[in-house]
Amino acid sequence: MNNAPRVSLINSRTSRIILANIIHVALIVSCALVLYLRANSGIPDEQMLNVAIDLSGMVTGYVLFMCNLIDARKSGVTYKYYMYVLNVVMAGLYTDAMGWLLNGIASLSGIIMLAGTINSSCVPICACFFWLFATDGIRQKHRSLQILDKFIQAGMLLALILRFLNLFMGFYFMVDATGTYIRGPLYIVSLVYAYAAMIVTLTVITKERKVLKTYQIVAMYTYVLAPLIVGLITLMAYGLSVVFGVIMATMLLMYCVFNVDQSRERAVAERDLETATAIQKGVLPREFPPYPDREEFDLYATMDPAREVGGDFYDFFFIDKNRLVLTIADVSGKGVAAALVMMITKALLKNRMLDGDSPAEALYNVNNQLLESRDSEMFVTVWMAVIDVSTGEGIAVNAGHEHPILRRAGAKYEYIRYKHSIAIAAMEDMQFSEHAFQMGPGDSLFVYTDGAPEAIDSEMEMFGEDRLLEALNLQPDAQPQETLRSVTGAIEDFVVEAEQFDDITMLCFKYYGPADGQDI
Protein backbone atom coordinates (compact mmCIF):
# COMPACT_ATOMS: atom_id res chain seq x y z
CA MET A 1 0.00 0.00 0.00
CA ASN A 2 1.49 3.30 -1.13
CA ASN A 3 0.99 6.11 1.40
CA ALA A 4 3.49 8.50 -0.18
CA PRO A 5 0.83 11.15 -1.03
CA ARG A 6 -0.28 11.07 2.61
CA VAL A 7 3.22 11.41 4.03
CA SER A 8 4.13 14.65 2.31
CA LEU A 9 6.62 16.84 4.16
CA ILE A 10 4.34 19.89 4.33
CA ASN A 11 0.57 19.59 3.90
CA SER A 12 -1.64 22.50 2.91
CA ARG A 13 -2.61 23.36 6.51
CA THR A 14 1.02 23.45 7.60
CA SER A 15 1.89 25.55 4.56
CA ARG A 16 -0.75 28.13 5.49
CA ILE A 17 0.55 28.30 9.07
CA ILE A 18 4.14 28.75 7.88
CA LEU A 19 3.07 31.44 5.41
CA ALA A 20 1.12 33.29 8.13
CA ASN A 21 4.16 33.16 10.42
CA ILE A 22 6.43 34.52 7.68
CA ILE A 23 4.00 37.38 6.97
CA HIS A 24 3.66 38.31 10.66
CA VAL A 25 7.41 38.31 11.24
CA ALA A 26 8.02 40.22 7.98
CA LEU A 27 5.56 42.94 9.03
CA ILE A 28 7.21 43.37 12.44
CA VAL A 29 10.76 43.36 11.04
CA SER A 30 10.00 45.77 8.17
CA CYS A 31 8.22 48.18 10.54
CA ALA A 32 11.16 48.08 12.99
CA LEU A 33 13.61 48.63 10.12
CA VAL A 34 11.75 51.70 8.81
CA LEU A 35 11.51 53.01 12.38
CA TYR A 36 15.30 52.66 12.71
CA LEU A 37 15.90 54.46 9.39
CA ARG A 38 13.48 57.29 10.20
CA ALA A 39 14.36 57.70 13.89
CA ASN A 40 16.41 60.87 13.32
CA SER A 41 14.31 62.45 10.60
CA GLY A 42 12.37 64.87 12.78
CA ILE A 43 9.17 62.85 13.21
CA PRO A 44 7.03 64.52 15.94
CA ASP A 45 7.10 62.87 19.37
CA GLU A 46 3.40 62.00 19.36
CA GLN A 47 3.81 60.17 16.04
CA MET A 48 6.85 58.26 17.32
CA LEU A 49 4.83 57.29 20.41
CA ASN A 50 2.05 56.13 18.12
CA VAL A 51 4.48 54.00 16.08
CA ALA A 52 5.98 52.48 19.27
CA ILE A 53 2.49 51.51 20.46
CA ASP A 54 1.72 50.02 17.04
CA LEU A 55 4.94 48.00 17.01
CA SER A 56 4.31 46.72 20.55
CA GLY A 57 0.79 45.76 19.50
CA MET A 58 2.15 43.81 16.52
CA VAL A 59 4.53 41.84 18.71
CA THR A 60 1.64 41.11 21.10
CA GLY A 61 -0.50 40.05 18.14
CA TYR A 62 2.15 37.64 16.89
CA VAL A 63 2.46 36.08 20.36
CA LEU A 64 -1.35 35.70 20.53
CA PHE A 65 -1.36 34.20 17.03
CA MET A 66 1.20 31.55 18.07
CA CYS A 67 -0.60 30.85 21.36
CA ASN A 68 -3.87 30.22 19.51
CA LEU A 69 -2.14 27.83 17.10
CA ILE A 70 -0.63 25.90 20.02
CA ASP A 71 -3.98 25.81 21.84
CA ALA A 72 -5.76 24.57 18.71
CA ARG A 73 -3.21 21.79 18.27
CA LYS A 74 -3.49 20.67 21.91
CA SER A 75 -7.23 20.95 22.45
CA GLY A 76 -8.75 20.97 18.96
CA VAL A 77 -10.58 24.21 19.84
CA THR A 78 -10.12 27.05 17.39
CA TYR A 79 -11.70 30.51 17.75
CA LYS A 80 -11.89 31.14 14.01
CA TYR A 81 -13.32 34.65 14.11
CA TYR A 82 -10.99 35.65 16.95
CA MET A 83 -8.10 34.74 14.64
CA TYR A 84 -9.69 36.78 11.85
CA VAL A 85 -9.98 39.81 14.13
CA LEU A 86 -6.39 39.28 15.27
CA ASN A 87 -5.04 39.32 11.72
CA VAL A 88 -7.10 42.36 10.73
CA VAL A 89 -5.84 44.27 13.80
CA MET A 90 -2.27 43.28 12.84
CA ALA A 91 -2.85 44.79 9.41
CA GLY A 92 -4.32 47.93 11.00
CA LEU A 93 -1.33 48.34 13.32
CA TYR A 94 1.17 47.87 10.50
CA THR A 95 -0.45 50.31 8.10
CA ASP A 96 -0.95 52.87 10.88
CA ALA A 97 2.74 52.66 11.86
CA MET A 98 3.99 52.81 8.25
CA GLY A 99 1.65 55.70 7.44
CA TRP A 100 3.07 57.84 10.26
CA LEU A 101 6.68 56.78 9.58
CA LEU A 102 6.41 57.79 5.91
CA ASN A 103 4.21 60.83 6.52
CA GLY A 104 5.67 63.95 4.92
CA ILE A 105 7.71 62.19 2.20
CA ALA A 106 6.28 63.68 -1.00
CA SER A 107 7.69 60.97 -3.28
CA LEU A 108 5.81 58.30 -1.28
CA SER A 109 2.42 60.01 -1.18
CA GLY A 110 0.80 57.15 -3.13
CA ILE A 111 2.07 54.56 -0.63
CA ILE A 112 0.92 56.75 2.28
CA MET A 113 -2.55 57.01 0.74
CA LEU A 114 -2.68 53.24 0.20
CA ALA A 115 -1.57 52.60 3.79
CA GLY A 116 -4.26 54.99 5.05
CA THR A 117 -6.93 53.27 2.94
CA ILE A 118 -5.98 49.81 4.19
CA ASN A 119 -5.84 51.08 7.75
CA SER A 120 -9.23 52.72 7.42
CA SER A 121 -10.68 49.55 5.84
CA CYS A 122 -9.53 47.47 8.80
CA VAL A 123 -11.95 49.36 11.07
CA PRO A 124 -15.25 48.08 9.55
CA ILE A 125 -13.77 44.63 8.86
CA CYS A 126 -12.69 44.36 12.48
CA ALA A 127 -16.13 45.42 13.70
CA CYS A 128 -17.86 42.85 11.48
CA PHE A 129 -15.55 40.00 12.49
CA PHE A 130 -16.00 40.85 16.17
CA TRP A 131 -19.76 40.62 15.65
CA LEU A 132 -19.25 37.16 14.14
CA PHE A 133 -16.96 36.14 17.00
CA ALA A 134 -19.22 37.44 19.78
CA THR A 135 -22.41 35.90 18.35
CA ASP A 136 -20.89 32.64 17.11
CA GLY A 137 -23.09 29.80 18.31
CA ILE A 138 -26.21 31.88 18.96
CA ARG A 139 -26.89 33.33 15.50
CA GLN A 140 -28.35 30.05 14.24
CA LYS A 141 -30.78 29.90 17.17
CA HIS A 142 -32.47 33.23 16.41
CA ARG A 143 -33.88 34.18 13.03
CA SER A 144 -33.71 37.89 13.96
CA LEU A 145 -29.94 37.58 14.51
CA GLN A 146 -29.54 35.88 11.13
CA ILE A 147 -31.28 38.85 9.46
CA LEU A 148 -29.17 41.28 11.51
CA ASP A 149 -26.08 39.34 10.47
CA LYS A 150 -26.85 40.03 6.81
CA PHE A 151 -27.30 43.75 7.51
CA ILE A 152 -23.98 43.95 9.36
CA GLN A 153 -22.12 42.19 6.57
CA ALA A 154 -23.82 44.37 3.95
CA GLY A 155 -22.88 47.45 5.99
CA MET A 156 -19.25 46.35 6.01
CA LEU A 157 -19.30 45.96 2.23
CA LEU A 158 -20.77 49.45 1.83
CA ALA A 159 -18.14 50.90 4.19
CA LEU A 160 -15.37 49.32 2.10
CA ILE A 161 -16.83 50.67 -1.15
CA LEU A 162 -16.88 54.19 0.32
CA ARG A 163 -13.23 53.83 1.33
CA PHE A 164 -12.36 52.82 -2.21
CA LEU A 165 -14.16 55.90 -3.54
CA ASN A 166 -12.24 57.99 -1.01
CA LEU A 167 -9.05 57.17 -2.95
CA PHE A 168 -10.34 59.42 -5.72
CA MET A 169 -12.56 61.90 -3.88
CA GLY A 170 -10.79 62.40 -0.53
CA PHE A 171 -13.90 63.03 1.57
CA TYR A 172 -12.61 60.91 4.51
CA PHE A 173 -8.90 61.74 4.27
CA MET A 174 -6.26 62.61 1.68
CA VAL A 175 -2.50 62.97 1.20
CA ASP A 176 -1.39 66.36 -0.16
CA ALA A 177 1.47 67.16 -2.53
CA THR A 178 3.99 67.22 0.32
CA GLY A 179 3.06 63.65 1.32
CA THR A 180 1.24 64.78 4.45
CA TYR A 181 -1.83 62.86 5.68
CA ILE A 182 -4.86 65.15 6.15
CA ARG A 183 -8.25 64.15 7.56
CA GLY A 184 -11.19 65.24 5.42
CA PRO A 185 -14.42 66.94 6.51
CA LEU A 186 -16.32 63.64 6.65
CA TYR A 187 -13.66 61.66 8.51
CA ILE A 188 -15.92 61.10 11.51
CA VAL A 189 -18.56 59.61 9.19
CA SER A 190 -16.09 56.83 8.30
CA LEU A 191 -16.39 55.59 11.90
CA VAL A 192 -20.21 55.46 11.99
CA TYR A 193 -20.51 51.86 10.75
CA ALA A 194 -17.88 50.52 13.19
CA TYR A 195 -19.45 52.32 16.16
CA ALA A 196 -22.95 51.17 15.18
CA ALA A 197 -21.84 47.55 14.67
CA MET A 198 -20.09 47.57 18.04
CA ILE A 199 -23.14 48.97 19.82
CA VAL A 200 -25.37 46.36 18.15
CA THR A 201 -22.94 43.62 19.21
CA LEU A 202 -22.92 44.94 22.78
CA THR A 203 -26.73 44.99 22.80
CA VAL A 204 -26.93 41.37 21.63
CA ILE A 205 -24.30 40.29 24.20
CA THR A 206 -26.34 42.00 26.93
CA LYS A 207 -29.57 40.37 25.76
CA GLU A 208 -28.00 36.92 25.51
CA ARG A 209 -25.91 37.29 28.67
CA LYS A 210 -27.34 34.06 30.16
CA VAL A 211 -25.38 32.08 27.57
CA LEU A 212 -22.08 33.69 28.62
CA LYS A 213 -20.18 33.72 31.90
CA THR A 214 -19.75 37.04 33.73
CA TYR A 215 -16.04 37.39 33.01
CA GLN A 216 -16.64 36.66 29.33
CA ILE A 217 -19.19 39.46 29.17
CA VAL A 218 -16.77 41.84 30.95
CA ALA A 219 -14.00 40.98 28.46
CA MET A 220 -16.29 41.64 25.48
CA TYR A 221 -17.58 44.89 26.98
CA THR A 222 -13.97 45.99 27.46
CA TYR A 223 -13.18 45.12 23.84
CA VAL A 224 -16.05 47.31 22.63
CA LEU A 225 -15.91 50.23 25.04
CA ALA A 226 -12.14 50.75 25.38
CA PRO A 227 -11.49 51.43 21.65
CA LEU A 228 -14.66 53.56 21.39
CA ILE A 229 -13.64 55.77 24.30
CA VAL A 230 -9.99 56.05 23.21
CA GLY A 231 -11.09 56.72 19.64
CA LEU A 232 -13.30 59.60 20.74
CA ILE A 233 -10.58 61.06 22.98
CA THR A 234 -7.93 60.98 20.23
CA LEU A 235 -10.29 61.92 17.41
CA MET A 236 -9.03 65.50 17.23
CA ALA A 237 -5.40 64.69 18.16
CA TYR A 238 -3.45 64.63 14.91
CA GLY A 239 -0.66 62.04 14.91
CA LEU A 240 -2.13 59.97 17.71
CA SER A 241 -4.28 57.04 16.53
CA VAL A 242 -3.84 54.27 19.07
CA VAL A 243 -7.20 52.54 18.61
CA PHE A 244 -5.73 49.38 17.09
CA GLY A 245 -3.16 49.23 19.89
CA VAL A 246 -5.97 49.38 22.43
CA ILE A 247 -7.89 46.70 20.52
CA MET A 248 -4.84 44.42 20.62
CA ALA A 249 -4.54 44.97 24.37
CA THR A 250 -8.19 44.00 24.86
CA MET A 251 -7.66 40.97 22.64
CA LEU A 252 -4.88 39.91 24.98
CA LEU A 253 -7.36 40.28 27.84
CA MET A 254 -9.95 38.20 25.97
CA TYR A 255 -7.39 35.51 25.24
CA CYS A 256 -6.48 35.28 28.91
CA VAL A 257 -10.14 35.16 29.94
CA PHE A 258 -11.16 32.51 27.42
CA ASN A 259 -7.98 30.53 27.99
CA VAL A 260 -8.67 30.35 31.73
CA ASP A 261 -12.19 29.14 30.98
CA GLN A 262 -10.90 26.69 28.41
CA SER A 263 -8.30 25.38 30.87
CA ARG A 264 -10.98 24.71 33.47
CA GLU A 265 -13.12 22.87 30.95
CA ARG A 266 -10.08 20.97 29.71
CA ALA A 267 -9.18 19.88 33.25
CA VAL A 268 -12.70 18.54 33.79
CA ALA A 269 -12.62 16.83 30.38
CA GLU A 270 -9.26 15.25 31.12
CA ARG A 271 -10.56 13.85 34.42
CA ASP A 272 -13.57 12.43 32.58
CA LEU A 273 -11.23 11.04 29.93
CA GLU A 274 -9.09 9.26 32.52
CA THR A 275 -12.17 7.85 34.24
CA ALA A 276 -13.70 6.68 30.96
CA THR A 277 -10.42 5.12 29.81
CA ALA A 278 -10.06 3.27 33.11
CA ILE A 279 -13.63 1.96 32.86
CA GLN A 280 -13.18 0.99 29.25
CA LYS A 281 -9.88 -0.84 29.68
CA GLY A 282 -10.76 -2.34 33.05
CA VAL A 283 -13.60 -4.51 31.76
CA LEU A 284 -11.92 -5.83 28.60
CA PRO A 285 -10.08 -9.18 28.46
CA ARG A 286 -6.38 -8.35 28.19
CA GLU A 287 -4.52 -11.66 28.64
CA PHE A 288 -3.34 -13.22 25.38
CA PRO A 289 -3.42 -15.99 24.41
CA PRO A 290 -6.65 -16.21 26.43
CA TYR A 291 -6.94 -20.01 26.23
CA PRO A 292 -3.42 -21.38 25.81
CA ASP A 293 -4.58 -24.98 26.29
CA ARG A 294 -6.99 -24.81 23.33
CA GLU A 295 -5.46 -25.89 20.02
CA GLU A 296 -8.55 -25.35 17.86
CA PHE A 297 -8.08 -21.61 17.43
CA ASP A 298 -6.11 -18.48 18.18
CA LEU A 299 -7.50 -14.99 18.73
CA TYR A 300 -6.26 -11.51 19.52
CA ALA A 301 -8.05 -8.20 20.17
CA THR A 302 -7.06 -4.59 20.73
CA MET A 303 -8.83 -1.39 21.72
CA ASP A 304 -7.03 1.89 21.04
CA PRO A 305 -8.96 4.70 22.79
CA ALA A 306 -9.29 8.06 21.09
CA ARG A 307 -8.74 11.52 22.60
CA GLU A 308 -12.49 11.52 23.22
CA VAL A 309 -13.11 8.07 24.65
CA GLY A 310 -16.15 6.36 23.21
CA GLY A 311 -17.83 3.10 24.15
CA ASP A 312 -16.09 0.47 22.02
CA PHE A 313 -15.66 -2.97 23.52
CA TYR A 314 -14.83 -6.53 22.60
CA ASP A 315 -15.45 -9.73 24.52
CA PHE A 316 -14.97 -13.49 24.21
CA PHE A 317 -15.93 -16.35 26.53
CA PHE A 318 -17.04 -19.98 26.45
CA ILE A 319 -20.65 -20.83 27.26
CA ASP A 320 -19.88 -24.56 27.41
CA LYS A 321 -16.96 -26.83 26.62
CA ASN A 322 -16.79 -26.02 22.89
CA ARG A 323 -18.97 -23.02 22.10
CA LEU A 324 -17.08 -19.72 22.05
CA VAL A 325 -18.83 -16.34 21.97
CA LEU A 326 -17.15 -13.45 20.11
CA THR A 327 -18.51 -9.92 20.53
CA ILE A 328 -17.49 -6.49 19.28
CA ALA A 329 -19.61 -3.38 19.81
CA ASP A 330 -19.62 0.41 19.64
CA VAL A 331 -21.69 2.79 21.81
CA SER A 332 -22.72 5.91 19.89
CA GLY A 333 -21.73 8.46 22.53
CA LYS A 334 -18.47 9.73 24.03
CA GLY A 335 -16.88 10.10 27.43
CA VAL A 336 -17.84 8.63 30.79
CA ALA A 337 -21.51 8.17 29.83
CA ALA A 338 -20.59 6.04 26.80
CA ALA A 339 -18.07 4.04 28.86
CA LEU A 340 -20.76 3.27 31.46
CA VAL A 341 -23.25 2.21 28.78
CA MET A 342 -20.52 0.03 27.29
CA MET A 343 -19.86 -1.66 30.63
CA ILE A 344 -23.57 -2.31 31.22
CA THR A 345 -24.14 -3.61 27.68
CA LYS A 346 -21.14 -5.94 27.87
CA ALA A 347 -22.33 -7.39 31.18
CA LEU A 348 -25.92 -7.82 30.00
CA LEU A 349 -24.91 -9.56 26.77
CA LYS A 350 -22.59 -11.95 28.59
CA ASN A 351 -25.25 -12.78 31.19
CA ARG A 352 -27.88 -13.50 28.54
CA MET A 353 -25.54 -15.78 26.60
CA LEU A 354 -24.48 -17.65 29.76
CA ASP A 355 -28.19 -18.08 30.59
CA GLY A 356 -28.69 -19.98 27.31
CA ASP A 357 -29.96 -17.31 24.88
CA SER A 358 -29.08 -17.52 21.21
CA PRO A 359 -27.31 -14.41 19.80
CA ALA A 360 -30.60 -13.08 18.40
CA GLU A 361 -32.43 -13.70 21.69
CA ALA A 362 -29.64 -12.07 23.69
CA LEU A 363 -29.78 -8.91 21.56
CA TYR A 364 -33.59 -8.83 21.74
CA ASN A 365 -33.56 -9.02 25.55
CA VAL A 366 -30.64 -6.64 26.08
CA ASN A 367 -32.18 -4.16 23.65
CA ASN A 368 -35.34 -3.95 25.77
CA GLN A 369 -33.39 -3.87 29.04
CA LEU A 370 -31.32 -0.89 27.86
CA LEU A 371 -34.41 0.96 26.69
CA GLU A 372 -36.16 0.46 30.04
CA SER A 373 -33.50 2.42 31.92
CA ARG A 374 -32.14 4.64 29.17
CA ASP A 375 -31.85 8.32 30.03
CA SER A 376 -29.85 9.29 26.93
CA GLU A 377 -30.10 8.92 23.18
CA MET A 378 -27.18 6.48 22.91
CA PHE A 379 -27.52 3.31 20.88
CA VAL A 380 -25.12 0.39 20.46
CA THR A 381 -24.00 -1.39 17.29
CA VAL A 382 -23.12 -5.04 17.97
CA TRP A 383 -21.65 -7.96 16.06
CA MET A 384 -21.90 -11.24 17.99
CA ALA A 385 -21.16 -14.82 16.99
CA VAL A 386 -21.15 -18.23 18.63
CA ILE A 387 -18.63 -20.67 17.17
CA ASP A 388 -18.41 -24.35 18.01
CA VAL A 389 -14.65 -24.78 17.98
CA SER A 390 -14.96 -28.56 17.66
CA THR A 391 -16.72 -28.31 14.31
CA GLY A 392 -16.26 -24.71 13.05
CA GLU A 393 -20.03 -24.20 12.90
CA GLY A 394 -21.18 -20.73 13.87
CA ILE A 395 -24.13 -18.37 14.16
CA ALA A 396 -23.68 -14.60 13.87
CA VAL A 397 -25.96 -11.60 14.34
CA ASN A 398 -25.18 -8.06 13.21
CA ALA A 399 -27.04 -5.19 14.87
CA GLY A 400 -26.05 -2.19 12.76
CA HIS A 401 -22.33 -2.95 13.01
CA GLU A 402 -19.53 -2.93 10.42
CA HIS A 403 -19.35 -5.77 7.88
CA PRO A 404 -17.17 -8.68 9.07
CA ILE A 405 -14.18 -9.68 6.95
CA LEU A 406 -13.45 -13.36 6.29
CA ARG A 407 -10.42 -15.15 4.87
CA ARG A 408 -10.66 -18.69 3.63
CA ALA A 409 -7.51 -20.80 3.92
CA GLY A 410 -5.11 -20.02 1.07
CA ALA A 411 -7.24 -17.08 -0.14
CA LYS A 412 -7.45 -13.36 0.65
CA TYR A 413 -9.61 -11.46 3.11
CA GLU A 414 -13.01 -10.41 1.74
CA TYR A 415 -15.95 -8.45 3.14
CA ILE A 416 -19.00 -10.51 4.01
CA ARG A 417 -21.95 -8.26 3.26
CA TYR A 418 -25.55 -8.92 4.18
CA LYS A 419 -28.48 -6.90 5.45
CA HIS A 420 -27.95 -5.77 9.02
CA SER A 421 -30.48 -5.61 11.80
CA ILE A 422 -31.01 -2.31 13.60
CA ALA A 423 -28.66 -1.25 16.42
CA ILE A 424 -29.76 -2.11 19.96
CA ALA A 425 -31.20 0.54 22.32
CA ALA A 426 -32.84 2.21 19.32
CA MET A 427 -36.37 0.74 19.26
CA GLU A 428 -38.32 -1.63 21.51
CA ASP A 429 -39.12 -5.26 20.68
CA MET A 430 -36.85 -5.42 17.64
CA GLN A 431 -36.14 -8.84 16.12
CA PHE A 432 -32.59 -9.67 15.08
CA SER A 433 -31.62 -11.93 12.18
CA GLU A 434 -29.08 -14.74 12.60
CA HIS A 435 -26.69 -15.97 9.91
CA ALA A 436 -25.21 -19.46 10.01
CA PHE A 437 -21.64 -19.95 8.81
CA GLN A 438 -18.95 -22.58 8.71
CA MET A 439 -15.24 -22.11 9.31
CA GLY A 440 -12.59 -24.50 8.00
CA PRO A 441 -8.99 -25.12 9.00
CA GLY A 442 -6.88 -22.02 8.30
CA ASP A 443 -9.88 -19.67 7.98
CA SER A 444 -9.65 -16.28 9.71
CA LEU A 445 -12.32 -13.82 10.82
CA PHE A 446 -11.68 -10.10 11.37
CA VAL A 447 -14.18 -7.76 13.03
CA TYR A 448 -13.72 -4.12 13.99
CA THR A 449 -15.44 -0.87 14.93
CA ASP A 450 -15.92 2.11 12.61
CA GLY A 451 -12.87 3.88 14.07
CA ALA A 452 -10.67 1.80 11.75
CA PRO A 453 -12.13 2.65 8.31
CA GLU A 454 -13.10 6.15 9.45
CA ALA A 455 -9.64 7.14 10.73
CA ILE A 456 -8.79 10.44 9.00
CA ASP A 457 -5.58 12.10 7.88
CA SER A 458 -4.75 15.81 8.03
CA GLU A 459 -6.69 16.39 4.79
CA MET A 460 -9.85 14.88 6.37
CA GLU A 461 -9.68 11.85 4.06
CA MET A 462 -10.82 8.55 5.55
CA PHE A 463 -8.70 5.41 5.71
CA GLY A 464 -11.65 3.59 4.19
CA GLU A 465 -12.75 0.00 3.63
CA ASP A 466 -10.44 -0.57 0.65
CA ARG A 467 -7.28 0.38 2.54
CA LEU A 468 -8.40 -1.74 5.49
CA LEU A 469 -8.74 -4.76 3.19
CA GLU A 470 -5.36 -4.02 1.59
CA ALA A 471 -3.72 -3.88 5.03
CA LEU A 472 -5.20 -7.27 5.96
CA ASN A 473 -4.02 -8.82 2.70
CA LEU A 474 -0.43 -7.66 3.08
CA GLN A 475 0.12 -10.78 5.23
CA PRO A 476 -3.11 -12.76 4.85
CA ASP A 477 -1.79 -15.89 6.57
CA ALA A 478 -0.37 -14.07 9.61
CA GLN A 479 -1.35 -14.97 13.16
CA PRO A 480 -4.08 -12.80 14.74
CA GLN A 481 -1.66 -10.69 16.77
CA GLU A 482 0.50 -9.94 13.72
CA THR A 483 -2.61 -9.22 11.65
CA LEU A 484 -3.77 -6.54 14.10
CA ARG A 485 -0.30 -5.04 14.31
CA SER A 486 -0.19 -4.81 10.51
CA VAL A 487 -3.58 -3.05 10.34
CA THR A 488 -2.67 -0.67 13.19
CA GLY A 489 0.60 0.20 11.43
CA ALA A 490 -1.20 0.89 8.15
CA ILE A 491 -3.68 3.21 9.88
CA GLU A 492 -0.86 5.05 11.70
CA ASP A 493 1.09 5.48 8.44
CA PHE A 494 -2.03 6.89 6.80
CA VAL A 495 -3.12 9.39 9.47
CA VAL A 496 0.49 10.40 10.35
CA GLU A 497 0.02 13.03 13.10
CA ALA A 498 -3.71 13.70 12.65
CA GLU A 499 -5.80 13.57 15.84
CA GLN A 500 -7.68 10.33 16.53
CA PHE A 501 -11.32 11.15 17.29
CA ASP A 502 -12.80 7.66 17.58
CA ASP A 503 -11.79 4.46 19.31
CA ILE A 504 -10.23 1.80 17.08
CA THR A 505 -11.18 -1.69 18.23
CA MET A 506 -10.32 -4.89 16.35
CA LEU A 507 -10.60 -8.63 16.90
CA CYS A 508 -9.10 -11.41 14.79
CA PHE A 509 -10.03 -15.10 15.15
CA LYS A 510 -8.11 -17.87 13.37
CA TYR A 511 -9.54 -21.36 13.29
CA TYR A 512 -7.42 -24.57 13.15
CA GLY A 513 -10.08 -27.26 13.74
CA PRO A 514 -11.36 -29.63 11.02
CA ALA A 515 -14.38 -28.46 8.99
CA ASP A 516 -15.36 -27.73 5.39
CA GLY A 517 -15.75 -24.02 4.60
CA GLN A 518 -19.03 -22.45 3.61
CA ASP A 519 -20.06 -18.77 3.16
CA ILE A 520 -21.10 -16.82 6.20
Image: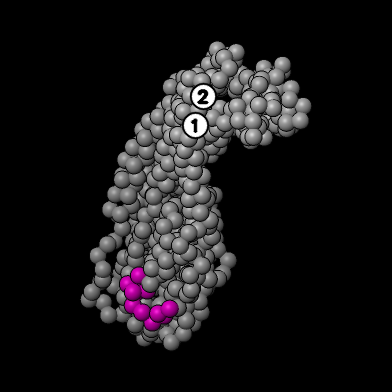
**Residue plotted at (73% across, 28% down):** 166
Between residues 249 and 409, which one lies in front from this camera angle? 249
Q: Which residue is mark 1?
A: 38
Residue drawn at (48%, 19%) of the image: 45
Report whether residue 174 is seen: yes
Q: Which residue is mark 2?
A: 43
Rendered location of residue 294, percent (x, y): 26, 77
Per the image, label 2 sits on a secondary structure element best described as: loop
Instruction: Answer left or right for 126 relative to 441.
Output: right
Could you tell me which residue is drawn at 53 percent across and 56 percent down? 12
Question: Is label 1 in contact with label 2 (beta carbons under 8 Å)?
Answer: yes
Residue 436 visible (yes or no): no
Report whether 307 appears left or right of 2. Answer: left
Estimate the x, y position of residue 245 in percent, counting from the top left: 49, 25
Instruction: Say which of 411 and 247 sits in front.
Output: 247
Mark 1 and mark 2 lie on one chain; the one further toward the N terminus is 1
Question: What's drawn in magenta, residue-wise?
Answer: 474-485
**Residue 478 located within the stretch drawn in magenta:** yes
The kind of secondary structure element at disc 1 is helix
In three-dimensional space, the C-alpha distance between marks 1 and 2, rounded to whole angstroms, equals 8 Å
Residue 130 versus residue 506 in the image, above or below: above
